Each structure stands twice: as structure tokens, then as C-alpha cells.
Image: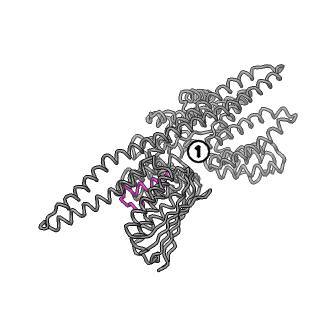
Amino acid sequence: MKKISILLVVLFFQQASFAQDRHLIDSIFTGLNVKENDTNKVKTFNLLAYDYLGKDPNTSIYFSKEALKLSEKLNYGMGMTEAFLQMSSGNINIGKYEEALKNCNEALKIVEQLLSSENHALRPSLLQQKALLLQNIGIVYWHQTNYSESLINHYASLKIREEIKDKQGIALSLNNIGIIYTELYNYPEALKKYFAALKIREEIGDKGNMAASYVNIGIIYAERGDFGEGIKYFSSALKIFEGFGDKVNTAYTLNNIGSLYNAQNNTAEALKNYSSALKIQEEVGDKRGIASTLENMGIIYSMLGNHPEALKNLFASAKSKEEMGDKAGLAITYNNIGNVYMLKKDAKEAYHYLNLGLSVAKEINDFEALNYNYLSLSELDSTEGNYKQALHHYILYVSFRDSLYNEENTRKLVQQQLQFDFSKREAIAKVEQEKKDGIVQQQLQEQKVIRNSFIAGSILLLLLLFLIINRNKLKRTVEMERMRSRLSRDLHDDIGSTLSSINILSHTAQSNLTSTLDEKVRLSLEKISERSQRLLDSMSDIIWNINPGNDTIEEVMSRMVEYGTTILEAKNIDYSFNFPRDRVDCKLSMEIKNNMYLIFKEAVNNLSKYSGATIANLSLIFDDKTILLKIEDNGIGFNQFEISHQGGLRNMQHRAEEIKGEIKILSSLNGGTKIELTMPRYC
């Protein structure tokens, strides 16, 4: 049941020089109320916003808003851009990425207006602000996994910083670009960028951002499986964060260390670090961090056999994810809760939460969550002796596992192509920087060619991606059909033939019984014959369902007619089938076909056993959007609420829901019964 992903958090710092003098900050805060409403007070608000950024992002946002209000009142452009910058950083720290992006774009408009003015003295400061804003935009896109836009903005930020010879900024841009290379699985290039950034930071004594380099280098070692070296670098970063009182990054680093200890099966140290991280995250209100830490703690407690504590943490994680609307995380958490109940041997609760997780995963089409859910359901089915359903869920698990593997390979291919494109873009940008002002027209022409090439390349890349996905999808379909055909043959040849021989032998034994033979022996032989026949019928349904040759609606209708004719004739019930006479070109999935047929089978079986009917009408009607299956009789009817055993009716309802259909059961005493299944036309 273990579903732990190491929380590897990459860190971005903006202006480390602001947070060095604690006594200076305290004196500014104390004297804030007596200052005049001038530009100096704006600077003080912005300074306080920066100082609280890592310790209390919400307080940081409050001070940046105060700075913005006063700047607008004074028409102080530099104050407004700084306020928006600090506000965006605070929103990034609490996960409000769209709000952060809006803050940055508002600030960029002001910066461009100021750069177009004739005040050249402000140009270096404005360019530095622009670089920081482009950096924050890159951070937002990184959080949203839009790596192409992230790279564009980080390269643009680096270009400005090289122009103004901002060493601290250059190191920060190198660090950020290294982060994207990490996401693209290019670990050698990522380490190259990280160590280049670290070298600059050591030269200028930038301890705060040295910690960021330590964290990112530790991440690379963790990705490579060298957990001991990863812990070493994370611990170096932790000392710096604690020294600065940076609570947000202290918590993230503790979480990283805990995850690496857990990877080494050192659960005691893992829990110790998680607990410390959780305490800080609750203090600063970091909901996303709280949810991740609680889930990791819950999984460890489950591994230790402490199920009450495991459930306590997992339910708290689920609540936090519900509040954030994190459905992808919620699907995994429900699965983990179900697995804990499975370990407790509480099948009812296990099924409830596993199916809840499955429902959320289906809603957002999350293949990874579906993969884990189907595997857990297969294990639970097997434990409960529901081998048919266990096989069904295991086949779905294998299908999604293969799909994830193929999609991961496709994603890596696309990311490698993006990496190549942006490395090429960086080289072109450097060449253009070296050109003289006298060839501006030539530069514009080259930029036009690059733009058109990039557009054409993007189109080709999207086309390639489309072809790869469709090819993999076709390959998975063919492989699945081969597996189903092989499984169908094996079940028929092996288990089917064995059951048939048992059935034949029991019939033979009954035929040869003498009148003097023990009555108990005769009854035992009858039970063997009856149960082997029942098992043969069930096995026949499974083999028919698995065989891909039976996936057409024609085959489904043929089997319905065969079953209905056999059952109804045996009960001397007059019947009619109102099925389409013309060929219907329609292929159904295994799950939809099976549920549709079993609903029909249950309805006909109930009709023959309990209705006392003399006439039955069975219809299958198609229109452009739906399929309608209708079964009617003139029997004695029934009152649903007075039936003591409703297992069959509940099963029909559950199967209808699984195929996104609706079932109606209309019956009255002595008024007959009508069952209608309405489902989408899947073909």
C-alpha cells in the first residue's frame, strides 16, 4: 500500500541582502506608526513584506498590500513594482499561483512604462526589478508544470542579469534553469548549473542562496538513489534556514530529510523529521505541505502496524486536500485509507474508500491513481474470495500500468525535445547579444526566422506527440486483446474441460446407482452435479466476456437471445424479442458488455423464478445517443420495499451505475413488472 513520493522542493530566493539585520528590522517596525506617509514609508512596508516572506507569507502579503495602497496614493512607480513583486512571492509560498501571475503582470506593465520614460538613472534598478518579475513568472509556471514557459522566463531573466552584471541574480537564474533540467531528467546538466550557481554564491558570501543550492544538489543525489549524500546536503541547507528563521523552507527541508530516511527504512528518524515539519507548517498555515506531511506520516504508521494513528493522519490529509480542491492527491489518499482498512481486515470500509478513490480518479482521468486503485481492489477481492472480480480488476490494473509506462516514455521524449529547443534558443540569444547596434535590421530578420522555425518546430513536435500516443494506444489495445484471447483459451481448455469431466462423472455415477446404495451418497452426487453445472455456467460467462471476439453488440444480443430462450421455454412462458433486425456496427468495452449482459441475465432469471408470468417481452432499442434495454412481464409483480433479500436488485443498480446508465424497476401487485436500463451509446 506504500504510496510515498519524496517531497523534493526546489527553492527560489529573491533578495537575500534584505534579511540580514534583525535589529534594524525591529527598529523599523517599532517606528512605523510615527513615519509620514511618504516614499520612505512605502520602502519600510516593502522591507517588512520581504522579511516576513519565509516566516509568515500571509503577513508578508499584508505589508505588500499596504505598500501598494500608499504607492498608488503617492503615484510612486518603483514602490508599486516592489509591492507587486513581494505580493507575488507571498502568493507563491501559499500556493495561489494564478494570483501571483496576476501580480507579476501588473508590475511588468508599470516597469515597461517607466523604462520608456527619459529617466535613465532608474534604468539599472528597473531592469533588476524586471528580472525578478520574470523569475517569479518562471516559478509560477514551474509549479504548474509548464516547463517551456518557465524556461522562456528564466532565460529572459538571466539575459537581463548578465547585461547589468548582477552576480547574485545570475546565480539565481542558473539555479532556476538547473531546476528545469532536473524536471527534464538531465541530471548532469542540472548539477552543472547548480554548482556554477553555488560557486558564485560562495564568492559573494550569499549564505541564504547557498542553502538553495544545497537543497537542489541534494535532490539530484536523492533522484539517483544516493540517500545518504542527499541527507548530507539537505542538512547543510537546514542549518542556514534555521539560522535565518525561515520557517517555510525549514519545514520543506525537514520533510525532504524525513522522506530520505523513510527510503532507507529508518522510520524513527523519518517520523521525527515529519513531526517537526508538520508543527511549522501548521504554524504558518501551509495547507499543501500539511497534507503531504500527514500522508507520509500515516503511511509510516501503517507500515509499523499502528492502524489507528495511520487513519488519523490520513483522514486529516484528506480533509486538507478537500479544502484545497486537490482531487489528484485526494484519490491517492482515499486509496491509502482503503489499504489501511484492508490491513485491519475491515472489508466493508476498505471497499468504501477504495471505490471512493476510484470515483475521484475517474472524474479527473488520473491514470496513476487509477493504476493504484485497481491494484488495491484486486488484492481486496482476492482476500475476500471474489476471484472473478479480482481478475477483472487486475486486468484493468495491468492495462493502466502499461499505459503509464508508455506515457512516461512519451513525456520524457517530449521533454528532451524541449530541452534541445531551449538550449538552442540560449545559444542563439548569446550570439545576438554580441552583434553591434549597426545591424539591428538583420537581427530583426533573424528573430523572425527563429520565431517561424519555433512555430513550425512546435507544430511538428505536437504532430509527433499525437502519432506516438496513438501508436502506443493501438499497441496497448492489440496486446490487451491478445492477452484476453489467450486467457479465454486457457480457461476453456484447462478449467472448463476439468469441470465438464467432473459433471459428466457425477451424472454417470448417478445413472449407475443401485437402489440399495446409501441415500446420502446419492444426494452428495446430486450436489456435485448441480454445483459443477452452476460453476460451468459461470465459467462460460467469464470466458465469453474475456474473449475479444465477443465485443460486438451483435454477439451480446445473440447471447441474450440464447439465454432468454433457454430459460423462458423451460418455464413455458410465451416470449418475444424485439431486437434490431439490421446489423448494428457497435463494439463495446469488456466492462460495459459484461455489466449490460449480467443485468439482462439477472432480470430474466428473476422473471422466470418469481413472476408467475405467462407472457414476456424483451426489447433492445438504439437511438443516436442511448441504448434502451426493456424487459416486461404480466406476472404477479411485487413491492420493492417488502422484499427481504434485495441482493439481485442492488447488483443491477450497481452495474448500471458502473456503465453510467440508469435502471428503472416498475412493478405493482398483480400488475406485472417492467425493468428499463438506459445507458449511453458507447459506439
Q: Pick the residue in front: 537 or 179.
A: 537
- 69 displayed left or right of 21: right
What's the colour scheme? one colour
Number of disc labels:
1
Q: Pick the residue in front: 578 or 245.
A: 578
Please, which residue is most extreme toward the right here? Answer: 118
- 411 displayed left or right of 603: right
In which quadrant of the rendered view does residue 142 lie? top right
Residue 215 pos. (x, y %):
54, 37
Which amino acid is tagged 1?
Answer: Asp
Q: Pick the residue in front: 370 or 6.
A: 370
- 102 displayed left or right of 212: right
Please, which residue is most extreme toward the left here? Answer: 516
* Secondary structure character of the magenta stretch overall: helix
The residue positioned 80% from the left and 42% from the top of the image is 110
Crowd around label 1: few <14 · some 14–19 · many ≥20 (10 Å): some
Q: Where does label 1 land, which residue? A: 246
The magenta span reads: 332-351
Q: Pick the residue in front: 128 or 442.
A: 442
Residue 126 pos. (x, y %):
78, 36
- 10 displayed left or right of 351: right
70 lies above or below 261: below
In which quadrant of the rendered view does residue 507 lie? bottom left
SS at mark 1?
loop
Does the rendering let one see residue 294?
no
Instruction: Find out whether residue 341 is within the magenta segment.
Output: yes
Instruction: Find out whether residue 122 is within the magenta segment.
Output: no
Residue 247 pos. (x, y %):
57, 47
Does the rendering let one see residue 267?
yes
The residue positioned 42% from the left and 63% from the top of the image is 565
Residue 416 pos. (x, y %):
58, 30
